[in-house]
Image (cartoon, grey):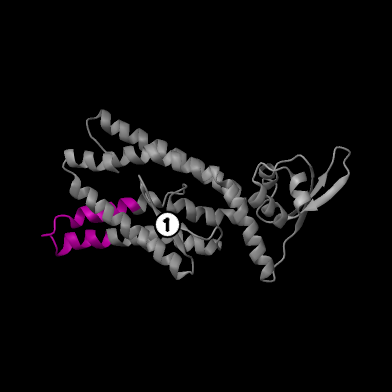
Amino acid sequence: MLLLIFFAFISDNLISLLLAFTALSLHEICHALMARGLGYEISAIEFEPFGFVARLRESAMDRWDELLIASAGPLFSLVAGMVFLAARSAALKGFPYFEEFGRINLWIAAVNLLPALPLDGGRAAKAALSAFLGEKSAVRLLGGFGMAAGLTFAALGIGALLKGKMNLTLLVWGLFLPFAALREIRTLRAYRLSAMIRRSASLKSGGAASVRYVAVHRSLRAREALKLFGDGRYVALYVVDDDMRKLGELDEASLLFGLSNLGQEAILDDILKRH
């Protein structure tokens, strides 16, 4: 951020940076208000080089709620952009920054509507696609789109630079968006935990889940066992020894207990003994 302010200062673009900061702030406030309105608690709002990210305290949420929260920001930016551009062209021509503020909001809306994680469009697409592809496949697909989008922004920024035009927005997004997308892919373990929590909530509310039994060796580590738990079915692990004799059974709650108390490197035999 300090480097961005420095470049904005030497290129006489501080006003544009302030307008962008204001537009991004209002965009993220809409996400936060929608989340609070749906009953979710905001744990933090992180500043990223390409904008703000509201982090929810809950690790799992209803997919419709996720879709509404992700859509709130781009919808506001789209409406704000059209309103300010209309006001600038209609009666408020004495306000020189209305048009720029409107264009910034439209740019924010357009970029965030891309179906690429971690952008809002990617989160909305994940909520929709998870029902058909599963959360893991949806995250990998949309995270890949995010990395591709970032590389595209970088190429456009470098192309503009070679032509003698400095576009800090394209360069910053191109530099940081691929890393942010990669981080989303690396957090698949958290999505698996979220799926387990959603199953628990569904069962408590009277729902049902199909059961899948998997035989695993006693030496398997907890982090590897977690990969066996999908989005839809309840998984039970048969823990066996070298002679394929059943030593015991671990359900989802037992594995979560082992992860939280013994760590992800714990072997299933140790978790079984503590269970």
Which class describes the residues within 10 Å of circle 1: few (<14), some (14-19), or many (20+)? few
Q: Quadrant of residue 63?
A: bottom right
Region rendered in magenta: 82-108
- At 55% from the left edge and 43% from the top edge, which residue is drawn? 140
Above or below, 266 against 28 in this view is above
Picture coordinates of residue 162 (x, y %)? 27, 28
Which three-letter amino acid code belongs to the residue tagged 1? Ala
Please, which residue is most extreme toward the left here?
94
Asked if one can make out residue 11 in the rendered structure from this viewpoint, the answer is no
Q: Is residue 202 above or below residue 25?
A: below
At x 76% / y 57%, what residue is drawn? Answer: 211
In the rendered structure, the answer to whether residue 256 lies left or right of residue 215 reads: left
For image coordinates 19% across by 57% down, the residue present is 98
Q: Would you say residue 201 is visible in this rendering? A: yes
In the foreground, 177 or 100: 177
The front one of 273 and 188 is: 273
Residue at x 26% of width, y 31% of height: 161
9 left or right of 206 in image: left
| Quarter of the figure with residue 36 | bottom left
| Residue 31, picture quadrant | bottom left
Across and down, in percent, residue 128 comes to 54, 57
Q: Which residue is mark 1?
A: 44
Q: Quadrant of the C terminus?
A: bottom right
